[in-house]
């Protein structure tokens, strides 16, 4: 009845029209939601300390209008009926609730279900789940599946080969710059050209990290006198904007992150990667909470999401850890390339460098 050319024409046309139609519907819906239309009313039940974080998560979906917020106490026996009545009076069909507000009241899910309300439980109070986790049923019971992170097996060796080839290329091309920096340090202040500091690397093993010296020779001893001036809020890292230990040449090197260049040797030796969580001194690691040690499950890097997201301008270590975990969860060779390109931009702008 139809020639093969007609069949192929109809097949291609149907695929194009279907995809185009769905794209138009999705784009139009997204645009309308941005304008405040095609949104669902939602209600939030959470303690004050979690409200901002949950609100930010819900707003990223771009489909809900939060019409009411109440604390966990609203689920107590004396108040729960009034809470559900309030939710229904607002015409809300979906409720978001933080885990700690309902963990000992899971039976209350039945109250919401019988009232025709969809309940979303957000585990904000728990340790952060990997994005790769999957919910499924086993023997009729719900379970969470946590597949291994991507930075293992073949992915590890792909990253390692890329690091090694790139590091050798940088050493060849930047060799005149290495010589110029070495001479500047030698003429500026007494002491060695390089500075080797013990830091914690893969699986918690200590490594010697190479850097161009940017401080006076007794900087480690002087740090104890400066601890009270630490600008990191939680005190895990030590950061000080106008550190008196930094030399004149050292200040310039730090502004453009040139002091990090010798770490290319650490990459060649397999102790570090071009991109990854920054290796920290033992002084910082000793102040880690248990959840922070996940940073040591991958090779540390010369640069990473922390460096391209503000570097020293980020004064909360928990934010640093979130960025590191996000990198581990979403790793790809393309992500490494993007971070390296962003690093060049950040270095040239001297963003958060001191």
Image: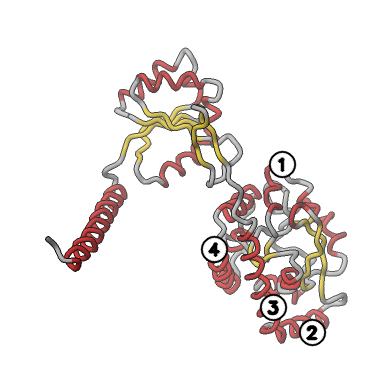
Q: Which of marks 3 and 1 is in front?
A: 3
- Which residue matches tag 2? 183
Q: Which residue: 22% across, 65% down?
A: 8
Q: Which of marks 2 and 1 is in front?
A: 1
Q: Which residue: 49% across, 32% down?
A: 137
- Which residue matches tag 3? 168
Distance from Cα at disc 2 to Cα at disc 4: 35 Å
Is any part of residue 47 visible from this angle?
A: no
Q: Is mark 1 on a helix, strand or loop?
A: helix
Q: Is residue 322 above or below residue 210?
A: above
Residue 175: image x %, image y %? 72, 84
Q: What element carries label 2?
A: helix
Q: Nearer the viewer, mark 2 or mark 4?
A: 4
Residue 246 or residue 6, whichever sits in front: 6
Residue 266: image x %, image y %? 75, 69
Residue 290: mark: 1
Horizontally, residue 121 falls left or right of residue 202, namely: left
Distance from Cα at disc 1 to Cα at disc 4: 27 Å
Q: Which residue: 60% across, 51% down?
A: 149
Distance from Cα at disc 3 to Cα at disc 2: 22 Å
Is any part of residue 229 visible from this angle?
A: yes
- Which residue matches tag 4? 335
């Amino acid at each position: 009845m139809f020639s093969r050319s007609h069949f192929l024409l109809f097949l291609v046309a149907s695929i194009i029209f279907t995809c185009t139609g769905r794209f138009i519907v999705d784009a139009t819906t997204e645009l309308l939601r941005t304008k405040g239309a095609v949104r669902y009313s939602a209600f939030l039940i959470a303690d004050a300390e979690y409200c901002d974080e949950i609100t930010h998560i819900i707003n990223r979906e771009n489909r809900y209008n939060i019409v009411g917020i109440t604390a966990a106490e609203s689920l107590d026996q004396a108040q729960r009926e009034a809470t559900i009545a309030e939710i229904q009076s607002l015409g809300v069909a979906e409720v978001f609730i933080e885990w700690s507000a309902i963990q000992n009241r899971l039976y209350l899910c039945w109250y919401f279900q019988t009232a025709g309300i969809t309940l979303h439980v957000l585990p904000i109070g728990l340790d952060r789940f990997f994005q790769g986790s999957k919910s499924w049923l086993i023997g009729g019971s719900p379970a969470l599946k946590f597949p291994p992170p991507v930075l293992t097996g073949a992915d590890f060796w792909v990253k390692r080969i890329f690091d090694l080839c790139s590091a050798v290329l940088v050493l060849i091309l930047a060799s005149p710059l290495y010589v110029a920096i070495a001479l500047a340090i030698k003429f500026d202040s007494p002491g060695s050209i390089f500075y080797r500091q013990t830091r914690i690397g893969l699986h918690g093993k200590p490594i010697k990290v190479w850097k161009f010296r940017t401080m006076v020779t007794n900087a480690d001893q002087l740090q104890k006198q400066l601890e009270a001036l630490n600008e990191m809020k939680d005190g895990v890292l030590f950061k000080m904007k106008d550190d008196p230990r930094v030399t004149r040449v050292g200040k310039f090197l730090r502004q453009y992150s040139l002091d990090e260049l010798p770490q290319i040797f650490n990459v060649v030796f397999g102790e570090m990667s071009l991109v990854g969580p920054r290796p920290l001194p033992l002084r910082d690691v000793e102040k880690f909470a248990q959840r922070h040690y996940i940073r040591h499950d991958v090779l540390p890097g010369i640069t990473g999401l922390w460096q391209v997201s503000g570097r020293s301008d980020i004064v909360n270590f928990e934010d640093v850890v979130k960025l590191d975990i996000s990198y581990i969860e979403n790793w790809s060779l393309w992500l490494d390339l993007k971070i390296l390109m962003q690093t060049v931009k950040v270095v040239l702008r001297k963003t958060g460098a001191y």
